[in-house]
Structures are given as structure tokens and as C-alpha cells.
Amino acid sequence: MKEWQEEQKALNEEISRVCRQPFLDKVIGPPSVNPLRTAALMLAFTDEDRKQARVQKQIAAAVLIQLAMDTHDLIPSVTEEMTQEHQLIVLAGDFFSGMYYRTLAEAGSIHWVEILADAVKKVNEAKTSLHRHQLHSKEAVFGAVQTIEGDIIGAVYKENKADKTVWHAIQQLLAADRLLQEKEKPFIAFDALARVLGTNEQAAGALKHQLEQIRLTINTCIQNMDERSASVVRAERDRLFSVPLRFVEEG
């Protein structure tokens, strides 16, 4: 596990380095690379493949395109004018998007743009449906969150024909990560839930119940995967939920 953690740390640091742009850092702050996404992508490749510089760049590129899309989300969907701050946020998102293409070019993997294109389209459509209040059930809202957080990484798993049980657990972790963020700082998914269910209190209750279901699903997945993958998923689960669930629910 120590070797895995060192590899994950090195990848996160490299992605952060690629993302850094002094002017943008100064005006809107340095980008935040989600370590769960790096871990999720690492599990989509074999230990041998991950040692290759080409694969490391493919992982970085998948993180970069999601970072670009996350950054553009910071622009309010309805605004009377494009402020200088908004313009800089757009510029930052475009910069990360440009680094996505550059990283794939350096890896000799431009064909990955096509591999991820459908997932990027679906993520944008899911975000639009949330912003425009086009979803009419809590199941649809949670489905949109799963698409937004999981489809790009899922395309990598599909391309690599990676383990389906591992992918199902990762999909749940990614959704949980987003829902936990929305629990602490409500954003478009929480707002959509509140609109569908009627009140913030009902939205909070639905979110809590969904997180518990996700947690139980992850535990079931862990029991059906190899020990290396299981140890990574356990660690990410415990980090997210901040409790050692395996001693309570897996025994």
C-alpha cells in the first residue's frame, strides 16, 4: 500500500505542476486536483502499465479535462454581466482544457480525445439538465451526479476492459465524493434535489440516505475484488466517510 500511495502522490504532484499558471494562481488561486480521481484512474491500469510515461500522461489528461469542466462550473448559470473574475475563470478552464490536449499529444495518445468525447458530451448534458431544472425526481438527480463524476473515468475503464466490480465501486466512490461536497457546500445537485423534493430539509434527508446506500454498495463490492484493489477502495472509502466501516459492516 505504501508503494501505491507514493505513486499516487507523485502523480498528483505532476498533475498539479502541469496545471500551475502563475497569473491564474495569483488571481483565482491554484487548482485543486482531486486525489480520488487519480486513484480511480490508476486502478483502471495494471501495475506494469502504470509505470509507462505514456499511461501516466493519459491519467493526467483525464484528470485535466474534468478539472477544466469543474472550473467552468464556477461561472453562475445566470448572470447579468461577465465580470473580470468570471472571465478569468473561463480563461482558467480553457487553459486546463488546452493542457488536456497538450498532455495527450505528448503521450502520442490523441486518439484518446475520441475515446473520451462521448463521456464529455454526456457530462455536459447532465450538468445542463441540473442547471436548467430539467430533472423531476431524486433518482434522476442522483443519476446526473453519477454521470458527471463517473463517465469520463468510466470511459477509461471501458477502453482498458478493466474489472467491472472495481469500476462499480469506483463509480460509487466518485458519486459519494460529490454528494459529500454538496452536503457541506450546497451546489447545483443539492439545489436540484431541493427543487424536486420541495425543501432543503427533504433534500438533505435524501442525500443522507443515498450516501448510506452508496456506502453499503461499496462494502459489497469490496468483498468481490482482489485484495490490492480492495485495499485501495477501502482506504478511499474510509477517507471519504471518516469511519473504519470494514470493522463494523464487513465482519
Image (cartoon, helix red, strand yellow):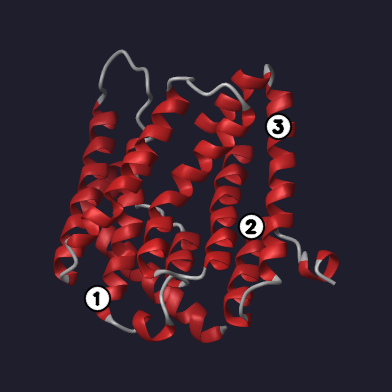
Left or right position of 40 against 172: left
* Amino acid at dot 2: Leu
Numbered tag placed on residue 240 in the rendering: 2
Which residue is at the front of the view, 138 or 62? 138
Residue 33 in view of the camera: no
Residue 42: image location, x then y, percent: 43, 71
Residue annotated with mark 1: 54
- Quadrant where the N terminus sits is bottom right
SS class, disc 2 = helix
* Amino acid at dot 1: Arg
Left or right position of 245 against 143: right
Nearest to N terminus: mark 2 or mark 1? 1
Residue annotated with mark 3: 204
Residue 247: image location, x then y, percent: 82, 71
- Mark 2 to mark 3: distance in Å? 18 Å
* Amino acid at dot 3: Ala
- Mark 1 to mark 3: distance in Å? 42 Å
The residue sitting at 41% across, 53% down in the picture is 32
Q: For marks 1 and 3, give the one nearer the viewer.
A: 1
SS class, disc 3 = helix
Residue 193: image location, x then y, percent: 61, 27
- Quadrant where the C terminus sits is bottom right
Which residue is at the front of the view, 6 or 114? 114
